[in-house]
Image (tube, grey):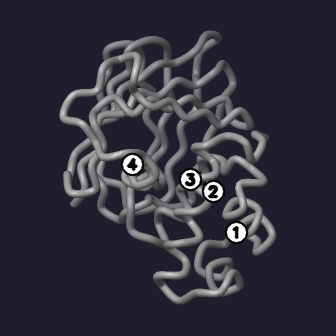
Amino acid sequence: MRSAEDPLDTRLGTRLAELRAQHGWSLGELAERSGVSRSTLSRAERAEISPTAALLNRLCHVYGRTMSQLLSEVEAEPAPLVRAADQRIWEDPASGFVRRSVSPPHPGLRGELVEGRLAPGADIAYDRPPVSGLEQHLWVLDGALEVTAGDRAHHLDTGDCLRMRVFGPTRFRCAGSGETRYVLAVVRP
């Protein structure tokens, strides 16, 4: 858990509250739509907790956004070039997931590149895609990764690439004894 002093968590909490207000939903209505408890939603909006990847995925689904789009909405105006040292990194310490926004994020663009890192034993399950029909190209740079989309499981080793359209649950699991590093190209439908 991060403190409320983390500026990204504070901006993210503010943006989540704005999105809920734009839809005219109470915390209870959002809790019903997302399957996330009212107390967790409230704490995330007040930046008392740093949302997990699974929590953000549920909220992105409800709001029809990818995670990169949501995160880009809390950053300054996007630049056409983002140097490696300036690429935004987001961590979910609870799951062992580190996410780097490689391409300059922008809400008006359909595609984005993300670097993912999973610690040994990391296992992330998403109960739904942030946007139904999302196209993903997953290229493993180092390590081994097990990906399940719906009821279909895939084992990927270094250099392998999987293309999938996501309509239901997915799961990403580090399948080796070391860290898994991959690139995810995400294309909105």
Q: Tag 3's secondary structure?
A: helix
Three-letter residue code for mark 1:
Val
User: Mark 1 or mark 2, which is nearer the start of the sequence?
Assistant: 1
Q: For the residues carrying marks 1 and 3, which lies nearer the camera in this image?
A: 3
Identify the residue shown where x is 39% and y is 48%. 72
User: Mark 2 or mark 3, which is nearer the start of the sequence?
Assistant: 3
The residue carrying mark 1 is 36
Inter-mark Cα distance, 2 to 1:
7 Å
Quadrant into which the N terminus falls: top right
Q: Tag 4's secondary structure?
A: helix
The residue carrying mark 2 is 55
Label 2–label 1 contact, CB within 8 A: yes
Identify the residue shown where x is 54% and y is 44%. 171
Q: For the residues carrying marks 2 and 4, which lies nearer the camera in this image?
A: 4
Three-letter residue code for mark 3:
Arg
Number of other residues with Cα within 10 Å of mark 3, as a class: few under 14, some 14 to 19, many 20 or more: some
The residue carrying mark 4 is 72
Three-letter residue code for mark 4:
Ser
Q: Position of residue 8 (x, y in %)?
A: 57, 44
Inter-mark Cα distance, 3 to 4:
11 Å
Label 3–label 4 contact, CB within 8 A: no
User: Mark 4 or mark 1, which is nearer the start of the sequence?
Assistant: 1
Q: Position of residue 89 (x, y in %)?
A: 50, 30
* Residue 137 in sight from this viewpoint: no
Three-letter residue code for mark 2:
Leu
